[in-house]
Amino acid sequence: MKNWMLAALLLPLMATAQVQLDVNRDNFVNSGDISAIYSYLLDDNDQFADNCDVNGDGEVTARDITCIYDYLLGRDGENDRRMSFLHISDTHSVDVTLLPALEILNSDPTYSFMILTGDFLPTETMMQEVEASEKPVFIIPGNHDSWNEENVTYSYGQQGFREQVLNRLYPNGEVNFGDDVANFFYVDVTQNGCTIRVIGLDLYDFDNMGKPVVMNSVVFSQQQIDWLIDVLENSGDKDGIVIMTHNGFGNSKQNTRDPNYVNEFVSINAYGWWDTYNYVGDGDAILIPSIIEAYMTGNNLTDAEFKSGHKVKKVSQMINVTTHFTGPHNNFIAYYGGHLHFDIVEYLSEFPNQLMSIIAYGGRGKGNTWNDLVKTNTGEDSYTINASNINFTTHEHKIVRLGSKKKDDGTLRESILFNF
């Protein structure tokens, strides 16, 4: 939003109540004070350098700008605890969505990190773009990343993705991997006194289980599931938990999704998609949701068996699950995924307290035809980004669409609000 638009929308506030926020000392707290801090940070103007540290923490950062936004919007920085991040997916070797997402992430103090939920297939240029980000970008592999396909230049395979992508992006222990070769991890991000634990799951644990015949088949190892349970057992003190996956899941049988269910963030093309959340090859789609249900409720699992998704000689490899959660916990926010190439944001039908947020294809080409968006080759209508805005005070989760919004039926995909 242009500065003059912000100033017109937000009436100037007399600085007698907030002298410290009046950076340019014009007796008003408004967008001019935000511009003064921006100018200082960009080395364009240090006229008000002595006034830019409005939160008094000894340095001038985007947090000072956030303080002014909080004041202008009537937010209490201590009592109204918020955190926001961006979600993209399925870039498929094209930065048409990646570049604007990185620009928004790094220019807007609202957002603290970004997640990319698989089928990254990064070119060297894309790797450099992510490396240059001032804020963290967390990435998990998709089926195309992990399969090591012939004639696909940037498909690395499971071990290659860890060595050539994740180790390069997180060289200094920024994330906590499950082991030296695994692609699953957790990382804690703190902003405004709130901490979100981001858990990245690898649905293609081929090195431990072997590669299945069908590329889309989900392959979990017992090691990864035991690791996930251990991470969750130590997550009760976090303000929020989000789980990154590539595929969706949540239904144990076909035809369990209600095709008549409609909200602004359910793609028109998803209405008749009978197997939406079970689109994980031959895996058992309720494995992870069952563990999360135990975490949320405290109704623990004992020697429960699930398919891992990989079949050898038609014999399913089984995962054994026993949990010892102290629950109940109310800090699970949502799953985030892609893979389907269209949008779905709704609660799982068999787990109605678990929200799934799947975002449409973020690349260019035939994948765009699978979703219901009217997309252009350039500009705001060419990319798909969801912004998650979490209010820990009210336990509200608002998802806002940035980029492609117009659907084939002429309606818009703009925002939607959930509780967690």
Image (spheres, grey):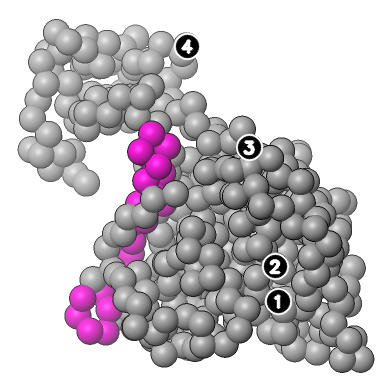
- The span from disc 4 to disc 1 (Cα, nearest Å) is 52 Å
Image disc number at residue 58: 4
Q: CA distance from mark 4 to mark 3?
A: 32 Å
Cα–Cα gap, marks 1 and 3:
26 Å
Image: magenta residue range? 388-411
Residue 252 in the image: state x and y as whole percent. Answer: 63, 78
Measured in 3D between alpha carbons, the distance from the residue under mark 1 to the one under mark 2, in whole angstroms, is: 6 Å
Q: The disc labelled 1 sits on which kind of residue?
A: Asp
C-alpha distance separating marks 4 and 2: 47 Å
Q: Residue at x 59, y 49 (%)?
A: 296
CB-based contact (under 8 Å), mark 1 and mark 2: yes
| Label at residue 144 | none
Q: Secondary structure at mark 4?
A: loop
Mark 3 lies on residue: 236
Q: Which residue is mark 2?
A: 287
Question: Could you tell whether 65 is left or right of 317 in the image?
Answer: left
Q: How many marks?
A: 4
Sequence order check: which comes first, mark 4 or mark 1?
4
Left/right placement of residue 253 relative to residue 30 reads right
The one of 264 and 5 positioned closer to us in this rendering: 264
